[in-house]
Amino acid sequence: MTAKSAAAAARATVYGYPRQGQGRELKKAVEGYWKGRVDADALRATAAELRRANWRQLAEAGIHEVPTGDFSYYDHVLDTSVMVGAIPARHRAAVELDPLDGYFAMARGTQDVAPLEMTKWFDTNYHYLVPELGPDTVFTADSGKQVGELKEALALGLTARPVLVGPVTYLLLAKPAPGVAADFDPLTLLDRLLPVYAEVLADLRAAGAEWAQLDEPALVQDRTPAELNAAERAYRDLGALADRPKLLVASYFDRLGDALPVLAKAPVEGLALDFTESAAANLDALAAVGGLPGKRLVAGVVDGRNIWVNDLTKSLATLGTLLGLADRVDVAASCSLLHVPLDAAAERDIEPQILRWLAFARQKTREIVTLAKGLARGTDTISAQLAANRADLASRAGSPITRDPAVRARTAAVTEADARRSQPYNERTTAQRARLGLPLLPTTTIGSFPQTAELRTARADLRASRIDTAGYEERIRAEIGEVISFQEKTGLDVLVHGEPERNDMVQYFAEQLTGYLATQHGWVQSYGTRYVRPPILAGDISRPEPMTVRWTTYAQTLTSRPVKGMLTGPVTMLAWSFVRDDQPLGDTARQVALALRDEVNDLEAAGTSVIQVDEPALRETLPLRAADREAYLAWATEAFRLTTAGVRPDTQIHTHMCYAEFGDIVQAIDDLDADVISLEAARSHMQVARELAGHGYPREAGPGVYDIHSPRVPGADEAAALLRKGLEAIPPERLWVNPDCGLKTRGWPETRASLENLVAAARTVREELAGS
């Protein structure tokens, strides 16, 4: 096919779409099912209607080929485990009794059975359920979900393409099951898994699939020759199948690197590649391997992870270059649109001047369709859209909203000394222990306590003027009093005020910092039914006035025990926001760090002796390629130290991280120079404690003994057993006892019981240490 005919064939598609619905109908239906208010049939009906609505919206916008199978009640990797029959032994009875309840048991656990481990999906804030595999794993095909959803779309008269997690990525994301040797490599199961994929593909072909997409984002990471050989073998074998749809192998989030020639030579009919800024090297690399003669190329030129309007002229230039490199070039977003909100048009409180700079899923869909039309029919057919796009880009570039000379001058004046504590840790810790007077194995929580319906109603009533500020603040004071009283009675050593005034750990601060924008409807899935509204970082950042001092100091008046000041760190403020793309991330991080530094210093001046600056996203934002990590970690750790280094030696700085692969960043954790770090460890069986010990981490640490992402209440014996395992790696004088994460999403009954058990476990182990 010539470049001209490839352009004429160009069509628009996407790899996935937000699942929740405009009003988060899926969240409400699933949580209603968990609480017994919604039955299984009603839940399935809601899900089916949401799928139909998504497909209709895509088709009406001009998307030629809609994705199926990307919809999920909880997580698409968990769906893949079900599809291939990789059900952990402890969950098999529940799945056999009721597949839907068993599915949710794998995701959330039950009182008697622990859930699957959860961690971040590459460098996003989406969490997936980690497959548990071992040498005895037997895979069996269950294509029911994939076939059923394909048939739903085909019944609407749509061209549909099933989307599956690819077999290589699935195995690379997996971990050894409990009881399996830690050095077991799930990739050794590839030959056992491929026949199951072959069966699923055959079922999809029989159901009417012309194409099937196999997502292999793990191949954009650094891969060993053995892993690349596994990818070559997987697609050689799947490509050789006689009974299958055409195969489109998709990668995203970064450049494909050494895996590109492997996939380019594979006997598959198409590749989907990311061509946005972070993966721009794919363009030259594709030309270097001779392109994809005779194959389909789906070009991800619209950023599927950020919310700024596309530069249509620039994307068209990229697409034009690609025309000579494939038999057919189609247009798409760089990845699933799962990672952006649904519709910017729903925002009523954002200034029209700024709203024109934004593109959520529906707007990105229109950009994709516009680019496909321009590629296929010529730029004259989209001249009006190109002119409007140029005006939008110019409006943002020239807006005073984006630049504050005072902020830029302060950031430019930062020196290396500004990011160093005045004394080393071994001197600080002596002063801190004298000031705080804590027992061995001190107990604390991560920060938030349950956000009750009454608290959410109070915030809604305040926004709607049904109550005044005085009435709202009285409710907050009462809640803080209850939280402090409970912690004292339970016996916790370092308390928190519970954060009842906070809607979200990033949004709360973003709403009080200049340069940030908040949305009303910009919900994005984080995990399961947990949705967040990432704020938008549109301009330079500063802090007009204190943000947390008032409520922290009020809580401290209610107790003689130390109350932690609670802040979200600069890297997490970026990672869980939609960041500006018009300056380096490191520059933005320093601006945020200086704003937070002012808050840290004000907390200390108000008498706060313990200040926690959470950085759960430090690992999440780690570049996928090792070559890019040193520069990132340099500015990321500097930003944390810039936030915290201005305090006295006897002020204890804590940080917190959760649900990530910490082994990759142990040196960076050390470089933060925090006095205490708390980390998720319950689901991963204290793995992080061993990683810290292996590194020789010299400071205090609290590996979590209570998995807050599950509704189950861990017994005191269970928490004590985890604590003892932690002591195998961390000496008692440096070990803290805490949950994995904040308690915002939990209910009060389970929170009370779990924390009482946590404190009881700490007392038990203290007594054991005293008697040894």
Image (tube, grey):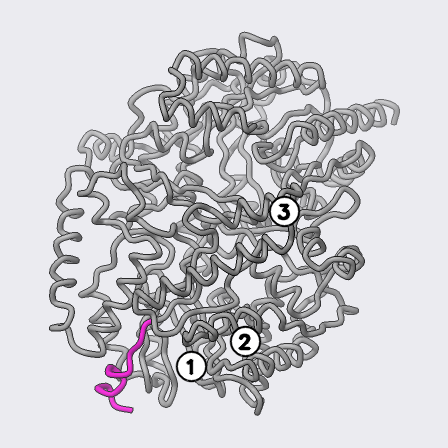
Q: Secondary structure at mark 2?
A: helix
Residue stretch in magenta: 1-12
- Residue at image position (62%, 56%) is 41
Q: Which residue position is annotated with label 3?
A: 33
Q: Considering only order in the chain, which callout, 3 or 2, is on the residue closer to the N terminus? A: 3
* Dot in front, 1 or 3: 3
Q: Considering only order in the chain, which callout, 3 or 1, is on the residue closer to the N terminus? A: 3
- Residue at image position (49%, 17%) is 476
> Looking at the image, can residue 641 be seen?
yes
**Can you give x and y, in whole percent of width and height, for residue 526 in the image?**
50, 47
From what the image shows, is residue 679 above or below residue 282?
above
Real-space Cα distance between discs 1 and 3? 40 Å
- Residue at image position (32%, 32%) is 415
The amino acid on which the numbered mark 2 sits, given as a three-letter code, is Leu
Q: Which residue position is annotated with label 1?
A: 270
**Can you give x and y, in whole percent of width and height, for residue 719 in the image?**
77, 35
